[in-house]
Image (cartoon, coloured by chain):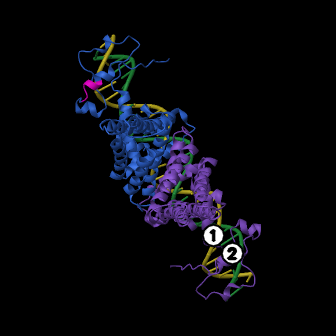
Chain colours: A blue, B purple, C yellow, D green
Amino acid sequence: MIHKHVLFPLADIRAQSNPSSSLSLDKLGILSIVEGFPPSLFRDFTMVAKLVNKDQKRRDIAQAAMGVFSERGFDATSMNLVAGAAGVGKGTIYEYFGSKDEMIAAAILIWLEDIIEGARSLSQRIEDPELRLRTFVNESMAEFTRDQSAIQTSISVFQVVLSNLDNSQWFDPIQSAFKETWRIIVQIIMDGHEKGVFNIHGQGEAEKIAINLVAYLDGICLHYYASGGRFDLMTQVDHYMEYLLESSLK
Amino acid sequence: MIHKHVLFPLADIRAQSNPSSSLSLDKLGILSIVEGFPPSLFRDFTMVAKLVNKDQKRRDIAQAAMGVFSERGFDATSMNLVAGAAGVGKGTIYEYFGSKDEMIAAAILIWLEDIIEGARSLSQRIEDPELRLRTFVNESMAEFTRDQSAIQTSISVFQVVLSNLDNSQWFDPIQSAFKETWRIIVQIIMDGHEKGVFNIHGQGEAEKIAINLVAYLDGICLHYYASGGRFDLMTQVDHYMEYLLESSLK
DNA sequence: CTTGACACTGACCGACCGGTCGGTCATAAT
DNA sequence: ATTATGACCGACCGGTCGGTCAGTGTCAAG
């Protein structure tokens, strides 16, 4: 006997509209369904209403997992620990993820999406292309200097992705996400080019500059911490940016 | 009861002078002592002749360990595996290292020293400063493109070092080793400066350039593999080198 | 030959891990 | 009230790991 599990289409909307359910229900992870919308009106006999927003909970668990990962690394983080951090039982995690690897992949993807979204919204708030580029770089560095675990998270992500290159089912979206970070910078550069602030030879060069910039930023942070802070981070970054802005982009 | 273990001072020299001992002895890790040099002549009653060169064996085990690490990563490598690769029993490893962490640190240090030594000897064979710098970069990249495990090893090293920053007793030497890689490039640049090929403002700038270059090379390799080869590696590196040689160093 | 320090070994240990599964509970439908 | 089901849980399982230790082999001194 095969059951067809189809998500009730309005579950999302109704869950969002009533985010602060009672404490006891919330503790159980159950989102109450708004009265007046009897599910029977919206589903046929094969559909079953879900009591929780599974997508959201999956996201919550992945987010909690990423928090633990960034402190201890992926290998050193047990599923028990993740369960504790997420406030659920270990068995529950396996309701949402097929394996630890799948959960890690999901956690990384969400983490990347947050970063990309943050970078995008930041760059949208600034008009001047040069200032926008500088702000992007400075904010990226600030994130790493603010708390050291950020760089440990990054390095853990790189390690997991690299050691799972064959496992494309989960890690393809992650690899695609890298392209997004480049695209943000390419857009900044191209915008500056159109405004006459930057001078480059076509979008191809903008992409090269963007890829190199992101790679450099990650690399310099890595070396900064790995070398035990044996140089001044911002001095190095400024040196890079100086030549980028005065040579490549002029 | 505390035993004072003092290495027989000439053990090193004699071990080196007779590197190819008989197979059976070698299998047991025992280096025969050259006849005609009765140890009694060289030690007083408190000193005891060692039958093996402990420093060398420690190095051998660490080297074998690094070989396994680079294939499987640190966490996925058990002490049994290392013991098998090194051709010794697991218990023997604990004669030479107090813990797995200590062995990892030793293995990383030896690995770094080999890299540094390789880079140094490479750069000594070339006269022209610009060609020397280009060759250094190209060889570094060739190492990473030749076999993918090289980048996995690097990333594992970064991860272990970063997550053991507090464990300074073992990882301080590793952090110092980073300085050496910079120094090699600084020397190339300064040599080019003295020969009138490069034009920089003092050694301080040479150091900035060197640190940024090494960081960039690591970063671009990382992104290349992590993004699943979504750009051409050498094109990016050439782009960086072009601006470095034509803007920063001219 | 005996002795004793040294080097080495792998069986063994307890802790822990990823993953499973039988069972509980709250709610919805009847 | 009863039944059905989605959601959740943690005890449990097979297996692995880092680390230990009692015992063996080796060699040189006595």
Q: Main secondary structure of the magenta part?
A: helix
Name which residue type carries label 1: Gln
Q: Where is residue C15 shown, x and y percent of the image?
A: 45, 53
Distance between mark 1 and mark 2 Cα atoms:
9 Å
Residue at 54% x, 60% y: name it: B108
Q: Where is residue A127 shown, x and y percent of the image?
A: 31, 37
Pointer 1 residue: B56
Q: Are marks 1 and 2 in contact (CB under 8 Å)?
A: yes
Name which residue type carries label 2: Ala
Q: Which residues are magenta?
A: A15-19
Residue nearest the viewer, comparing A86 with B131: B131
Task: Describe the element under mark 2 as helix, strand or loop.
Answer: helix
| Residue A14 seen anywhere in this rendered image of the structure | yes
| Marks 1 and 2 share the same chain | yes
Residue at 39% x, 11% y: name it: A45
Q: Residue furthest right?
A: B22
Q: Earlier in the sequence, mark 1 or mark 2?
A: 2
Q: Give me the disc on residue B248.
A: none
Q: Give me the disc on residue B15.
A: 2
